[in-house]
């Protein structure tokens, strides 16, 4: 190791860290138990989490295995790798550099990358977490190597990526990515992770695994900036540019709000496990910024990759269809919104591939039961909007009930489990030709959806708007 950094890492810990970084997606409880038994500090950490008041009288391998089982593979391995890396840098000298805030931000970016990777069906989401968690580590190394700049480097964390990058190059002669590539620590990093850290500010969208990982880091970096950087407008613009890069490798629609909320929740839990006094709670101001990003991302966010026999419409085409219906002699017409009840829990409980498979099955069933004259918008991950020309209140409610019953009847079979969901539906009928704008209509439709949800879900709520 470079002595300038005063990194205290034993040969044993270096070997452990190198192996931990190579964990595969299918890491088992038994493998994690073996690693835990080689790290007394990690065992102690697990015991503190699971037995805060009174520990078991004897600490044996079966007890440690049970601890790993209770934590779960994903939580345990994230705790293992982050605690070891943070431990390596615990005694590093960085005057006026806020290390705790730095680690919190690194955890957040890692969690964003992990959830992005799951959404994109990346081979190993854990690998994406590790790479993104380490992506800014060079900043800490720069602050240690050049102590009189540590305060400035710490403050730069509140600026967007492009500004951070340019300023570090001027101030220190290197970017944080270049810094980590020239230290002894880089020898411990798997080549794919090291390359993604080095290249993530200049991603090249391709379908191979290395390019995907680099793009995921780039997007996680940009979305992470929304939570902590200013000016917000610049952060949103950079995030939009980053998301457009992902579209070039043909990603599915992404629920950015869910990714952000899930990442915040995961980051908060991991910070608590690590004993970091975390201020990572659900940042509602950043969530509003994410919603703005979704609006900016509009057509790309709502575009649905076509099924073989018919496409869902994107938002621009859907609104054009609505304008055509409102301009012609096609009244009455109905609009309804269908929301899949608690669909996010399926993603969380069974994994995103399972959720995506169920969603694909539902989309196929929905398309097969609609008329060719109907217009359908896939609105985010778990919502659909239907425009039904020449459809009265009675006809609209019948369609709503038919869709509700259809969703309830569809399920995936995995082993002995049947995985499915229900739907809440809100709708309105326009009796005469009118030129109401979409925002006004959406408020009315969404109000009916909320009523259906508040009454217990798995139901249809309908209203004839005032003429």
Image (tube, rainbow, N blue to C red):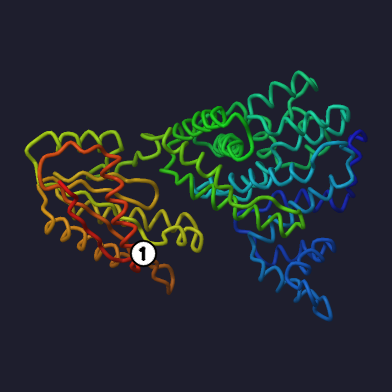
**Which residue appears farthest toward the bottom when viewing the image?**
57
**Residue 124 on image: x %, y %:** 58, 49
The spot of residue 210 in percent (x, y) is: 59, 37
Residue located at (80% from left, 61% from top): 42
Q: Is residue 151 left or right of residue 75?
A: right
**314 vs 70: above or below:** above
Who's the residue at 37% across and 58% down the image? 358
Could you say which is closer to the camera, residue 309 or residue 365?
365
Left or right for 306, reference 192: left
Q: Secondary structure at mark 1?
A: helix
Quadrant into which the N terminus falls: top right
Residue 211, image quadrant: top right
Residue 269's quadrant in the figure? bottom right
Q: How many marks?
A: 1
Task: Please tell me in which quadrant of the rendered image residue 410 appears.
Answer: bottom left
Kindly identify which residue carries mark 1. 454
Q: In x, y percent, where is residue 436?
A: 21, 38
Q: Is residue 428 above or below residue 178?
A: below
Relative vertical location of residue 306 with respect to residue 407 in this rendering, above or below: above
């Amino acid at each position: 190791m470079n002595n300038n950094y005063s990194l205290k890492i034993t040969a044993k810990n270096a070997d452990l860290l190198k192996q931990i970084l190579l964990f595969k997606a299918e890491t088992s409880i038994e493998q994690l138990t073996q690693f835990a038994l080689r790290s007394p500090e990690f065992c102690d950490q697990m015991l503190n989490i699971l037995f805060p008041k009174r520990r078991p009288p004897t600490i044996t391998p079966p007890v440690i295995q049970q601890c790993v089982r209770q934590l779960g593979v994903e939580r345990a391995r994230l705790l293992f790798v982050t605690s070891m890396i943070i431990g390596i840098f615990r005694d590093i000298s960085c005057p006026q550099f806020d290390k705790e805030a730095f680690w919190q931000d690194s955890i957040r970016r890692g969690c964003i990358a992990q959830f992005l990777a799951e959404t994109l069906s990346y081979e190993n989401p854990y690998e994406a977490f590790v790479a993104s968690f380490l992506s800014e580590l060079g900043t800490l190394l720069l602050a240690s190597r050049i102590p009189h700049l540590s305060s400035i480097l710490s403050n730069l964390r509140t600026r967007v990526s492009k500004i951070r990058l340019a300023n570090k190059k001027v101030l220190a002669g290197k970017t944080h990515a270049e810094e980590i590539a020239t230290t002894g620590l880089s020898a411990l990093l798997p080549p794919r992770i090291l390359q993604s850290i080095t290249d993530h500010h200049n991603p090249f969208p391709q379908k191979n695994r290395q390019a995907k990982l680099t793009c995921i880091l780039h997007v996680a970096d940009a979305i992470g900036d929304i939570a902590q950087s200013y000016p917000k407008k610049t952060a949103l613009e950079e995030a939009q540019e980053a998301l457009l890069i992902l579209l070039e490798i043909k990603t599915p629609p992404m629920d950015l709000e869910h990714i952000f909320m899930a990442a915040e929740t995961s980051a908060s839990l991991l910070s608590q496990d690590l004993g970091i006094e975390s201020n990572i709670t659900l940042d509602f101001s950043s969530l509003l910024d994410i919603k703005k990003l979704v609006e900016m991302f509009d057509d790309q966010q709502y575009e649905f990759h076509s099924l073989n026999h018919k496409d869902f419409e994107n938002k621009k085409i859907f609104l054009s269809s609505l304008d055509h219906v409102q301009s012609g002699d096609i009244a009455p017409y109905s609009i309804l919104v269908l929301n899949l009840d608690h669909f996010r829990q399926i993603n969380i409980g069974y994994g995103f591939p399972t959720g995506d498979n169920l969603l694909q099955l539902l989309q196929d069933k929905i398309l097969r039961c609609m008329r060719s004259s109907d217009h359908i918008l896939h609105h985010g991950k778990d919502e659909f909007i239907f425009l039904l020309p020449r459809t009265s209140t009675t006809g609209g409610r019948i369609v709503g009930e038919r869709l509700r019953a259809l969703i309830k009847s569809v399920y995936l079979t995995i082993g002995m489990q049947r995985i499915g969901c229900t739907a809440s539906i809100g709708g309105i009928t326009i009796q005469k030709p009118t030129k109401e704008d979409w925002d006004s209509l959406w408020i009315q439709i969404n109000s009916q959806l909320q009523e259906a949800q508040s009454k217990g879900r798995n139901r249809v709520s309908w209203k004839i708007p005032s003429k």
